Amino acid sequence: MVAALTGAFFDRPAGAVAPDLLGCTLVHEGVGGTIVEVERYEESDPASHSAAALRAGRR
């Protein structure tokens, strides 16, 4: 059975979501693949886009 990931799945700390994504298959318009590697960033991590307040608009 295939289940869609809901907002509740992502409404957790990055450290909990990232490992749970491993092995998930994402499909969009008939094209997809299995997630085999993840990286996680907390909002305060300087490598995160959200750390520099870039979440709302990219340059």
Image (cartoon, grey):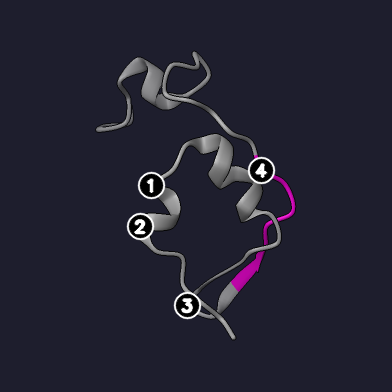
Q: Residues within 10 Å of mark 1 (few under 14, many from 20)?
A: few
Circle nearer the N terminus (1, 3): 1
Between label 2 and label 3, give the one nearer the viewer: 2
Circle nearer the N terminus (3, 4): 3
When the figure is inspected, residue 9 is found, relative to residue 52, above or below; the finding is: below
For the residue marked with disc 2, what is the amino acid?
Gly
- Say which residue label 2 marks: 7
Residue under the image location 36 percent in, 16 percent down: 52
Residue 38's disc is 4
Q: Secondary structure at mark 3?
A: loop
For the residue marked with disc 1, what is the amino acid?
Asp
For the residue marked with disc 4, what is the amino acid?
Val
Is 30 left or right of 24, judged from the image as shown? Answer: left
x then y, percent, for residue 13? 47, 37
Cα distance in 3D space between marks 2 and 4: 19 Å
Q: State yes or no: residue 57 in magenta.
A: no
Between 12 and 49, the one lying in front of the other is 12
x then y, percent, for residue 29? 47, 77
Between 19 and 53, the one lying in front of the other is 19
- Span highlighted in magenta in the image: 32-38
When the figure is inspected, residue 10 is found, relative to residue 16, above or below; the finding is: below
Between label 3 and label 4, give the one nearer the viewer: 4
Is 57 left or right of 39, judged from the image as shown? Answer: left
Residue under the image location 43 percent in, 16 percent down: 44
Q: Quadrant of residue 59?
A: top left
Between label 2 and label 4, give the one nearer the viewer: 2
- Say which residue label 1 marks: 11
